[in-house]
Amino acid sequence: MNFSIITPSFRNSAWLKLCIASVADQTGVTLEHLVQDSCSDDGTQDWLPHDPRVKAFIEKDGGMYDAVNRGYRRATGDILAYLNCDEQYLPGALAAVREFFEANPEVEVALAGTIVTDGDGKYLCHRHSMTPQTQHLWFRFPMLTSSIFIRRKVISERGIFFDPRWRDLGDFHWVLALMKNGVPMKVCDTFTSVFADTGDNMNLKPNAIREKAETDKMVPRWVQLLKPLWIVQHRLRRVRAGHFTLEPTSYAIYTRQSPGQRVRFDVAKPTAVWWNRL
């Protein structure tokens, strides 16, 4: 069971180096790492084409999701995923995902967990995934894409690519398409990834806010009227799943201060609350 990891890149040279390192040191799996760089002019082109750990494709694209689609079309792996420049895999992540898919042959989409840090790698919170429910999804996105893994058939047989018309909310509309097509999804109860909340992430920028407003207009009227109910149900699902009863833990990642070696962070009091995104 081989992996293809796609990373869309544009003017993120320093973060991209950390992302690549976190994929390259995965053990116990066979993988390829495809980087789709949109002709970055920040020095990325000085080193990326010469990095033997990746397959680099430097070409103009129609945005992040178009870049991911291009990578998926080029991918040769059995399991596909995309990892942004400001995201990393934790040690042993892909081996755990492989074991999950081997144990669940009927599942086409695995939803794992993500640790959220600040730009220096310091801990912010844990974010578990949950299988999405239609009414809840409009108001609470129950996963981070850094921890979504799909079987190749989602692309090759079902043809469910990202819609590049959405520059920032493509993830939401892609998951909605998975649900409409009845794609089997299941939670993989492990934390595979780290997302750096730098304050400059795409989903905080003006176009993302505009697309969010446009998407809000698509919510069925009756679903909108019952919004408080769906949010309460979503939170109760998290409570029942044990998201708020976390034990002390640790994680190891690459940082801008330590791009060549993982740094361990101990977390005495983990939380599932992402306080600066409430």
Image (cartoon, helix red, strand yellow):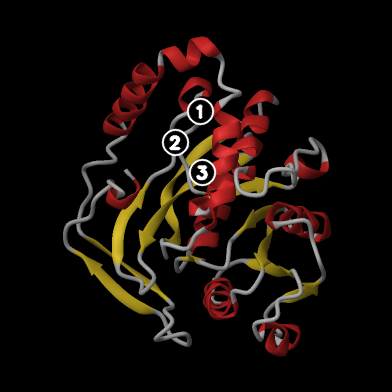
Disc on the earlier residue, 2 or 1? 2
Of discs 2 and 1, which sits in the foreground?
Answer: 1
Residue 111: mark: 3
Tell me the kind of residue under disc 2: Met
Q: Quadrant of residue 67?
A: bottom right
Residue highlighted by disc 1: 138
Asked if residue 97 lies left or right of residue 115, the reply is right
Tell me the kind of residue under disc 3: Leu
The x, y position of residue 123, in whole percent, is: 29, 64
Q: Are marks 3 and 2 in contact (CB under 8 Å)?
A: yes
Q: CA distance from mark 3 to mark 1?
A: 18 Å
Q: Residues within 10 Å of mark 3 (few under 14, many from 20)?
A: many
The x, y position of residue 44, in whole percent, is: 67, 82
Q: Is residue 278 above or below residue 191?
A: above
Where disc 2 sits, the SS reads loop
Please report the residue visible at 61 percent of the width from the left and 66 percent of the height from the top. Answer: 29
Asked if residue 252 lies left or right of residue 82, the reply is left
